Image: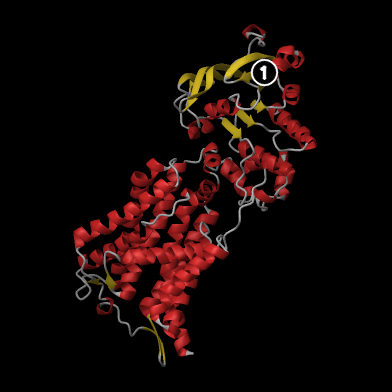
């Protein structure tokens, strides 16, 4: 099992979860989770169904409040911050199943991604998103619900990027996409990451996620059971075991 | 032909009022999936606010200031006051139940309706009050061709309700607040994930919807003169019918439904008999619920996964 010692030296924590425990009513979802995303890192959080991956992301964003533990963003304790304040400080999410506003246009969806901005950088941000996804410029007046799955994923990515995040949370980016689109999608995530955005990605497709990630954590029933650099996890027998259940 | 035109004008006047009230129904349904059965009573409160503003300026027979200023004050105070009342109702009655099963806020809405009706009854009694519009606005102004009479008050009601609808439509389709309202209506959690202030957006929706009902109440007082504490009940049902016919949750649908119901009523009253008006209107409601529950402009939601 990998330990903290395996972590690359000099990772300065952009995001740090410190002993997070979360309940939904009486049910414990996360048990003393600690993880870290360094500045410029692409970290993936792996695990099967109901292992607490999505809850972890929602805790980082602030939709879900932990019962105990701390969320640190660039060293600052943001545990009690509301969602808008966290977004304004550089966190954005591409939710599971994309969650686009289907009866609104592509352009309107992107505008809603910039809802917290003062509008001063809007044109610039929209330009950046259109440069990354030229297709979205072509389809700007089309209703988001009428786009193909791949295009919808682009809208969801673009919408998250409109708020200029330092840390992008990706919830199951491969879900519901064809294998070819999954490939394309991971290329885009890699590209966004290389442009300087740190990424925390939740994924069931472990091999795919680890192929582009720097490091990974494996969650199983609310606990981190395995962590380490991506190449090591890829080779790890423990990973298979963690996935198939101990 | 004169009779036809006359009934059409009557229908447009009544339809404008239905449409304004139906809009609030539909907007609230959009963001909360709640049928706010207290909405018709907000129209009644608006009519009373307008009435008391009129009295405060000296009453219909002895106005202290020019009529346009009085009318403006009546509309603004009824709109603002009833808007604020709507915000308070959402804050204290519906927000605590936001994550409860849908039947709970529905029953609460009925409770709020009774609360408003009976509070007003307690404060102002059961007797009818009279706007006595003809004492300060001459009904002889307006369009009069032969037997056709379209008085200035009806013209004002039709023009103002259409103007308010255009304004609302622009607000919802063009402004950031409008986009936020549509986002919250379409997927509340996704809206929250983008940092949209959901509570504020819902409050703003209640303010706008309630303000329109309050203004419609003043218009009703001006056109029909008599107001009373239970006047919101039947218009609440009619506006609900209009919202369903147009497609509940759809803003253009509420406008279309309002005018259709108003015009249908006028023609039934004019050419058949007023005895059958409610029978036929609620028959239309039942027919739509069975045959086309999504209404004329409502869309069946298709979700791609």
Q: Residue farthest to the bottom?
A: B146
Q: Secondary structure at mark 1?
A: loop
At horizontal 40% and vertical 54% (from top left) the residue drawn is: B36
| Horizontal side of residue A52 vs B105, given as left or right | right
Q: Is residue B7 visible?
A: yes
Which of the two residues, B86 or B176, is positioned nearer the viewer here?
A: B86
Q: In which quadrant of the rendered view does residue B144 lie? A: bottom left
Judge whether B90 appears above or below B118 on screen: above
| Horizontal side of residue B277 vs B60, given as left or right | right
Which of the two residues, B181 or B239, is positioned nearer the viewer here?
A: B239
At horizontal 42% and vertical 50% (from top left) the residue drawn is: B204
Q: In which quadrant of the rendered view does residue A236 lie? A: top right
Total tally of numbered discs in the picture = 1
| Horizontal side of residue B245 vs B217, given as left or right | right
Q: Is residue B296 visible?
A: no
Residue beneath disc 1? A245
Q: In which quadrant of the rendered view does residue A196 lie? A: top right
Residue B250: % across, % down:
53, 59
Judge whether B29 appears above or below B5 on screen: above
Type of colouring: secondary structure
Q: Callout 1 environment at 10 Å: few (<14), some (14 to 19), or many (20+)?
A: few
| Chain on which label 1 sits | A
Residue B293: % across, % down:
55, 61
Give the quadrant of the C terminus of chain B.
Answer: top right
Which of the two residues, B6 or B134, is positioned nearer the viewer here?
A: B6
Residue A76: % across, % down:
49, 20
Which of the two residues, B194 or B244, is positioned nearer the viewer here?
A: B244
Q: Residue farthest to the top?
A: A5
């Amino acid at each position: 099992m990998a330990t903290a010692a395996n972590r690359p030296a000099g990772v300065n924590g952009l995001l740090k979860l410190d002993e997070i425990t979360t309940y939904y009513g009486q049910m414990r979802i996360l048990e003393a989770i600690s993880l870290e995303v360094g500045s410029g890192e692409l970290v993936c959080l792996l695990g099967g169904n109901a292992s607490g991956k999505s809850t972890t992301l929602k805790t980082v964003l602030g939709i879900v409040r932990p019962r105990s533990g701390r969320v640190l963003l660039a060293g600052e304790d943001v545990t009690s911050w509301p969602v808008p304040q966290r977004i304004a400080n550089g966190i954005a999410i591409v939710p599971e199943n994309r969650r686009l506003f289907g009866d609104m246009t592509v352009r309107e969806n992107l505008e809603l991604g910039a809802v917290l901005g003062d509008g001063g950088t809007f044109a610039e941000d929209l330009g950046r998103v259109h440069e990354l996804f030229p297709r979205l410029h072509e389809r700007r007046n089309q209703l988001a619900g009428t786009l193909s799955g791949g295009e919808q994923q682009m809208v969801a990515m673009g919408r998250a990027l409109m708020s200029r995040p330092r840390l992008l949370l990706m919830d199951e980016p491969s879900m519901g996409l064809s294998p070819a689109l999954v490939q394309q999608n991971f290329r885009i995530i890699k590209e966004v990451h290389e442009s300087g955005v740190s990424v925390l990605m939740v994924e069931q497709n472990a091999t795919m996620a680890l192929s582009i990630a720097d490091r990974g954590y494996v969650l199983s029933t609310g606990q981190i059971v395995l962590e380490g650099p991506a190449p090591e996890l890829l080779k790890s027998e423990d990973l298979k075991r963690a996935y198939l259940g101990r | 032909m004169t009779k036809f035109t006359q009934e059409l004008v009557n229908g447009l006047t009544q339809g404008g009022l239905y449409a304004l009230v139906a809009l609030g129904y539909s907007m609230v349904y959009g963001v909360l999936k709640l049928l706010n059965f207290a909405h018709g009573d907000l129209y009644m409160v608006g009519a009373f606010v307008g009435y008391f503003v009129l009295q405060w300026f000296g009453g219909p027979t002895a106005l202290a200031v020019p009529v346009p200023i009085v009318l403006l004050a009546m509309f603004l105070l009824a709109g603002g006051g009833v808007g604020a009342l709507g915000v308070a109702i959402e804050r204290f009655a519906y927000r605590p139940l936001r994550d409860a099963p849908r039947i709970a806020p529905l029953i609460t809405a009925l409770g709020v309706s009774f609360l408003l009706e009976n509070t007003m009854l307690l404060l102002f009694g059961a007797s009818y009050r009279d706007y006595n519009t003809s004492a300060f606005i001459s009904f002889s102004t307006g369009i009069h061709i032969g037997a056709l009479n379209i008085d200035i008050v009806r013209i004002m009601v039709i023009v103002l309700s259409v103007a308010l609808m255009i304004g609302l439509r622009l607000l919802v389709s063009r402004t950031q607040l409008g986009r936020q309202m549509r986002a919250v209506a379409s997927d509340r959690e996704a809206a929250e994930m983008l940092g949209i202030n959901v509570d504020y957006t819902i409050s703003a929706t209640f303010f706008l919807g309630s303000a329109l009902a309050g203004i419609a109440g003043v218009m009703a007082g001006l056109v029909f003169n008599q107001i009373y504490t239970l006047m919101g009940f039947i218009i609440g049902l009619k506006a609900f019918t209009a919202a369903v016919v147009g497609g509940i949750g759809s803003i253009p649908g509420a406008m279309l439904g309002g005018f259709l119901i108003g015009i249908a009523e006028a023609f039934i009253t004019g050419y058949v008999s007023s005895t059958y008006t409610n029978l036929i209107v609620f028959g239309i409601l039942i027919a739509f619920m069975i045959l086309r529950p999504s209404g004329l402009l409502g869309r069946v939601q298709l979700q791609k996964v």
